Image (cartoon, coloured by chain):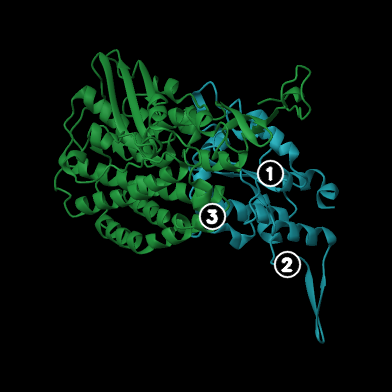
Amino acid sequence: MYTQTDIIKDTTQPGPDGTEGELVINVGPQHPATHGVLHLVITLNGETIQKIEPHLGYIHRSIEKMCESLSYRQFIYVTSRMDYLSAHINNLGCAQCVEKGMQIEVPGRAQVIRVLMSELTRIASHELWIGAMAMDLGAFTPFFYTFRERETINDIMEETCGARLTMNYMVPGGVMYDLHPDFHKRVKAFVAQFKHKVTELDDLVTNNIIFQSRTKGVGILSREDAISYGCTGPVGRGSGVNCDIRKLYPYAVYDTLSFDEVVETAGDSFARYMVRVKEMYQSISIIEQLIDNIPEGEFQAKTKAVLKLPKGEFYTRVETARGEFGVYIVSEGATTPYRIKFRSPGFSNLSALHHMAKGSKIGDLMATMGTLDLVIPDIDR
Amino acid sequence: MDLREEIVENNKPFPGEVHQVPGGGIVVSTFNDIINWARSNSLWPLTFATSCCGIEMMSVASSKYDFSRFGFEVARATPRQADVIIIAGTIVNKMAPVLKRLYDQMADPKYVIAMGACAISGGPFFYNTYSVVKGADHVIPVDVYIPGCPPRPEALLHALITLQEKIKSGLTRDQIREPFKASV
């Protein structure tokens, strides 16, 4: 943090060398719109943004370093705390990387349960994002509507996994427990509730003229820039990049399902919003395809008590609610990894913020930054 | 009598004795008790969330759990308008000076709730790392601790109610240390 007084210089007068006045302001680390502890140093000229410099590290918990001293079963639990809104999908990526190294065959029932849980997590994450995003733009009511659906999913998670938020349900070889007997009934009820209530969201947010005029044409990211910044997930797809890992590199049972990759071409904040809304419909369609077709059988493969990956390097990727999440393990053949690197979607998406917001008004920054759907512990790790 | 029993003993709906007289009643109380009672029912929390516990804090604010039932709905983004800081999430070395500064910017009387294992002791995982502060009470004094990773919303509600009970009983840290200053 800049504590020196010289950084907050209001040079409304032209400088001695004739340059125009600049105003440097700090947004964060304690700021409601940064969704955590992101710190932005913004250089303004009047109301126009000239430069945005994100400062990270306010929630750096050294997760990658810590994973080096944890066994292949243990390190998965820490990754729930990275992108806590996609905790299931983070766990899945790590479990798949260990399975790839150990060449463990995952039972069909576990594969289907994993996809069901991932899609429920995706809906819960997008629901929370819509509420928080609308709150950033000044509308408080959608927050209560979206949290109603989110709480239903949390209850389903709690019954089966035992936790509402950081579930730690995926283990190498399958899932930790079998499904709760009520799971089928509760998910069916949720799907019906979602379809019934989702029109409220359209009325409140999507078709709201204030919301549209604050997001349309704001924070435009072109397709080329999205590719060169490495933007994935709804940010990349909002700019017309086909980057859905579920389609490009299918894992679990995604290759047997019929669903569409949602791509918008406008590249503005509203396009990113629409990608997330349409993705929720796709997730519901995936859940409907699978919920009646969960195969019987084992929910976990037989594995050794102590896992040892062979010497080598392993990489897997999954599609979290924010984009491509990659796990890279370097193994020396021991019970703990030699090095773990996570490729988090938020870091790459944040790097495009300066490019997207440069030249726009500071009032539009909240719409631009909100649609990036940043989770700061995921970026800092 | 231990602290907990004392809190339960002092925790009445309204402080003081009611004397029935024809046409109504007269309440006899102390000024201190009335102020503590009033303060305990209008606590404004600071929206301070660093990580996962912040999502459960949002759940408590939302429709299912709704902490406005207990007088907490006015969540403020600036410390200058807030009374209670809920430390929701891990505090790392880089964030610790910021947390201290936020606490210093809050007006007296101020209260602190440490939510989750990270804010209590550095967390279920992060106790062994180079970057995490091993408990927020190394940085600022804490009134109520909530265990859990993350704690359930009911646990946060219970902590908020416990804080109210402590304030009503005049047993928070500031009130014990400087009883006169904290109440006037």
Let me know if residue A165 appears in the view.
no
Question: What is the x, y in percent for residue B48?
Answer: 61, 42
Q: Are marks 3 and 2 in contact (CB under 8 Å)?
A: no
Of A186 and A163, nearer the camera is A186
Chain B pictured colour: cyan
Q: Which chain is green?
A: A
Q: Give the amino acid type for the residue marked by disc 2 in the picture.
A: Phe
- Residue mark closest to the camera, 1 vs 2: 1
Among all residues in the image, which is located at the extreme front?
A18
Q: Quadrant of residue A8?
A: top right
Q: Give the amino acid type for the residue marked by disc 1 in the picture.
A: Thr
Above-or-below relation of B11 to A308:
below
Crowding at dot 1, Cα within 10 Å, few <14 / some 14-19 / many 20+, comes out as: some
Let me know if residue A186 appears in the view.
yes
Residue of label 1: B78
Question: What is the x, y in percent for residue A350?
Answer: 48, 31
Query: Could you tell me how far apart the alpha carbons at marks 1 and 3 are, in whole angstroms?
Result: 26 Å
Is A174 on the left or on the right of A380, as rendered? Answer: left
Write the residue at 25% across / 20% down: A308
Mark 3, secondary structure of its residue: helix
Residue of label 3: A210
The subunit letter for the residue under badge 1 reads B
Numbered label tally = 3
Crowding at dot 2, Cα within 10 Å, few <14 / some 14-19 / many 20+, comes out as: some
- Residue mark closest to the camera, 3 vs 2: 3
Question: What is the x, y in percent for residue A222?
Answer: 42, 32
